[in-house]
Image: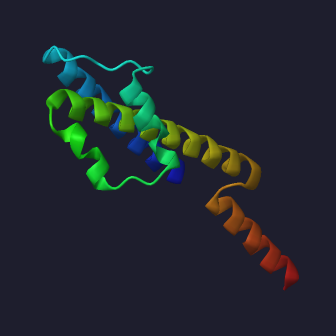
Amino acid sequence: MNIKLTGVARGSYGELLEDYLDYLRQHNLPIWDIRDPRVVELRASHTTYKSNESYKFYLESPEYHANLMVVLLHKENYLLDQLIRALENKFVNEGGYSENLFKKRLDSRNKS
């Protein structure tokens, strides 16, 4: 169930990303390239602490705000993809909740 719900969250963030990209296209605003210095700075921001004040600059114009959200949503989607892969591997290697509960029940029955 956790994998499924994480997939739903991933889908929702994917749709939100498309909404921001559509907004930029419909308003003839540039979509920043991955090599743009602003994108590089935002993508590297996970390595240092940044207060909310650091992002205030990006809220001053629709172009900056929408592109900030695009970058952050790409990061979020990447992290959710990694989480889904890890949850799937854990499920394959360790089994699911019901499966493990059944094993415990069998172990308990065998001990009695």
- Image quarter where the C terminus lies is bottom right
Taking 11 as reference, is 30 left or right? left
Name which residue lies at 68% across and 68% down.
101
Please give left or right for residue 12 compared with residue 75 in the image: left
Image quadrant where residue 20 sits? top left
Outermost residue to the right: 111
Image height check: is 36 above or below 40? above
Q: Can you give x and y, in whole percent of width and height, for residue 30 in the image?
A: 24, 16
Rendered image quadrant of residue 19: top left
Instruction: Please say if 36 is above or below 75.
Output: above
Q: Nearer the viewer, residue 65 or 85?
A: 65
Q: What colouring style does the render use?
A: rainbow
Q: Can residue 18 be spotted in the picture?
A: yes
- The residue depicted at 76 percent of the width and 66 percent of the height is 103
* Total numbered badges shown on the rendered structure: 0
| Above or below: residue 89 compared with residue 74 | below
Residue 1 seen by the camera = no
* Residue placed most toward the observer, 103 or 13: 13
Where residue 29 appears, as percent x and y from the top left, is 19, 18
Residue lying at 69% horizontally and 59% vertically, measured from the top left: 99
